[in-house]
Structures are given as C-alpha cells and as structure tokens.
Amino acid sequence: MHQLTLAEIARGLADKKFSSEELTRVLLARIAQLDPQLNSFISLTEELALQQAQAADARRAKGETGALLGAPIAHKDLFCTQGIRTSCGSKMLDNFKAPYDATVVAKLAAAGAVTLGKTNMDEFAMGSANESSYYGAVKNPWNLEHVPGGSSGGSAAAVAARLLPAATATDTGGSIRQPAAFTNLTGLKPTYGRVSRWGMIAYASSLDQGGPLARTAEDCAILLQGMAGFDANDSTSIDEPVPDYSASLNGSLQGLRIGVPKEYFSEGLDPRIAELIHNSVKELQKLGAVVKEISLPNMQPAIAAYYVIAPAEASSNLSRFDGVRFGYRCEDPKDLTDLYKRSRGEGFGAEVQRRIMVGAYALSAGYYDAYYLKAQKIRRLVKNDFMAAFNEVDIILGPTTPNPAWKLGAKNSDPVAAYLEDVYTITANLAGLPGLSMPAGFVDGLPVGVQLLAPYFQEGRLLNVAHQYQLNTDWHTRTPTGF
C-alpha cells in the first residue's frame, strides 16, 4: 500500500479495496521502521491519525466522497496544529503547543485528510539542506550521506521514501522546489496569496508560501485543491476563485510557448544537469510545445536582493521570540536584558542568529537606503523581467538547482555557497509567481529537477504541463533503493 499515490489511494478507498484505518496503520508502522534512518519526522501523531482515519471511514460509509477523504499526509512543522507541538525545527519552540490550527491544517482536516505527524525542517525555514534543525539533519533516501534539500527536507524525504503519499511544505526562496528536485518529487509553490499563511509561522512574510510535495503532478493538484482559497484571517490572501486543478491536467500542449532563459545556462550550472534540462525541452516539443530563448537580465542581482529582504523580514518576525510570552526561556536570568539575550542566544541556532543579525543590520538607520531599499528596487526589476517574458511565452523552463544534492556537512563552513544553490528558485518568490519542480533524470544516482514558472494564478497550467510530461516519462516512478 505504501507505493500508492494520492490519486490511487482515493480510487482504492472509493472501491473499498482497503480502509483509511488499514492504510494509516500500515504507514505508521513503516514510519516507525524506516524513519530512524532518515530523521524526517519531528512528531508522530498516531492517536490523532487513527481517530481521523476512523472518522473518514465513517464518512465514506455514509456515502461521502472526496479525493482527500481518508488520505494520509503530514505537515511541515511550522503549520500550527492545535494541542500538538509546533517547533519550527527550533529549540526556541521545542515546548510550544499551538492553541489553534493553521488554515491549511483546518482545511485539509475538513476535507478528511489524515495527519500522520509533523515533519523535520531547517530551523525557522532558514536553510537549503535541512541541516540547521534542532532535531538533527534529515537524510536523503536516495543516498543517506547526502542532504534532502531544505527547508522542507523532512516532508520531501518522507514522501520520497514512501512513508506517506504527500505532505505540506513551504517555499520562501525555493524550499518546496529544491527538496523536490533533490528527492525526485513534484513540488509546487503557488502564487503568493493563493494559500493562506494564517497559522504558518513566518520567516519572511512577503516571500513565504505554502504548497504541496508529492510524487506526481496529479497528486499535487489534489493536495493544492484542499489547501488553496481565500482566508479573511490572512491580509495577504487573494480573493480569487480556485479552479478545479485536476480537471486541467489533461489539456493538450499543442502550441504551448516555452521560454528558456539564456541566463540559466551559465558557468555555475552542472553541464550534466544542463543536458537533462535540454532533454526535457525535447520531450515537451514532441508533445507540441514551441520553444523560444528569452532573457531574464536581473537574475544575478536577485540573489543578493533576496538575501537582504528575507533576513530583514526575519529579524522583524523573530523579534517576538523573547523568552517572555512563549517558547524557550533561559534559567535564572539576572534581569530583563539578560532574559532577552540568553533566551535568544540559547534558543536560536547559528543560521537563524546569522540571518537575524544580517537583517537587523540591513534595516538599521545608516544602511536602510543602501541595502534594503536597493534590494526592493531590484525586486521590482525582477518582476518586470517576468512580465515582459510572459508577453512572449506561456511558461518558463529551466533547472531547479545548479547541482545535485551535496554531501551532509559539505557546505556548513561556507553559508554563501549554500545560498548560491537557490539562484534559480528565489526569483519566483521575489516576484510572487507560481513555480513547480518535477523529476527530470539522475546525475551520479542523485535526482535532478526541471523547474517550470507561470504567470500569476496559473498553477493549473504548470500542473497540466508536468502531468503531460509525466505521462510520457518515468523519472517520477523511480523509488530509492531500500525504500
């Protein structure tokens, strides 16, 4: 049963081939057996999962249907879940139990999804390797000596290892798409505002966006359907109708205009990945797509702009964790200043502290204009580049990452090297555009992803292209050895 996709599970439950409770028990046993190798979960919610599975079976027995009714999933551990630890991968929130459900959690629970647990992540979503977690690094199931990508590495590793069919994740600068590429999954970052951020603990508020991680585009469509929609609790949520994403999967690609930016194929890209990307283009051309070279001239300064804007917003968002109201508190503080300093110094890890300090510096009186304001101007130029490109093409295609997954610890001494791995993904976050990564092949036994970008609210177009590609290739069906 663990090899079934979300779509296959929905059909199996509808045909009464198995019950949600049977499936849930199988997957919980599999997690207990295999996750010690991966460290992909922070918390397991066995009791809740079985209650939800039994409730889903009862709803189906009464004639109710739904693609997510009885389907097992997990949540990245920054989505608040009522009465369950929501740690954000940090010592700071190790003892925090949310008093309410995030909108995404509530919507999926209402649809009948079964929550198996909370997945490991880079601390406060800051990282590209899932090595900054207070609970230890997550391992890539394709090679346990390599990283699974971050910050949603726990969700990615769990789905790739067939511990569950799909999971929620978040993407601030590529944290859905990069782990998807590193673990042979399909991952979708929706348009900014498409999925509610209410109850999703913030890293960088103007960049964060929740989305699905699954093995196929078809499964991403099912999970996104349950996650998307307007939320009055979230001031950045967009009141835009949510289309039927599954209904758009089978559209023809005849005449689809694909833009391939020349800036993507620079010295920093592994030539073997470049070859796989070109092979993907040829596959889509066979399906009727038309390919055109385009230009995104502000791609290079975008990475510098991102690493000013994101830490600046993080320094503001994380100021609430002060040892006073909730979360970690140091022992025996001498005074209030000592309480603040030691609680934050002991509660936050090195990467989080680094980004808070960079952000506070960029926002300080003497440097605001030189750094933060200039970064916001570059952000506008990046958006303008995309708007010009989408006047000529329907989607933009390129690599998700410049290299395959690196070895655990390989970039720990050089944070900038890890930051540069986000070069292809951050522009979508700066512009607020939807982006998808899908499996495109392997380099040295490690998965490689191809990235698709589309205009605002065109997630259905991305899912359609990815689904048609997956009907004609088998990369996404490959399973890591031992799982």
Image (tube, rainbow, N blue to C red):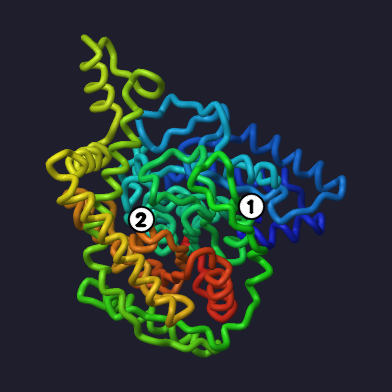
Does the image show residue 418? no
- Label 1: element kind: helix
Q: Quadrant of residue 410?
A: bottom left
Q: As drawn, is 445 to the left or to the right of 156?
A: left
Q: Which residue is mark 2?
A: 173
Is 134 located above or below residue 409 in the figure?
A: above
User: Callout 1: few (<14), some (14-19), or many (20+) C-alpha neighbours within 10 Å?
Assistant: many
Is 134 located above or below residue 142 in the figure?
A: above
Residue at horizontal 32 percent and vertical 52 percent from the top: 129
Where does residue 38 sit, x and y in percent of width and height?
43, 48
Residue at horizontal 66 percent and vertical 66 percent from the top: 246
Q: Sequence-wise, which precedes: disc 1 or disc 2? A: 2
Is 153 located above or below residue 398 in the figure?
A: above
- Seen as rendered, the residue at the extreme left is 366
* Residue nearest the observer in this picture, 128 or 361: 361
**Amino acid at the residue labelled 1:** Gly
Where does residue 231 sit, x and y in percent of width and height?
58, 45
Where does residue 373 sit, x and y in percent of width and height?
23, 51
Q: As drawn, is 340 to the left or to the right of 164?
A: left
**Amino acid at the residue labelled 2:** Gly
Q: Which residue is mark 1?
A: 226
Label 1, label 2: how far apart the Cα atoms are: 23 Å
* Residue nearest the observer in this picture, 386 or 345: 386
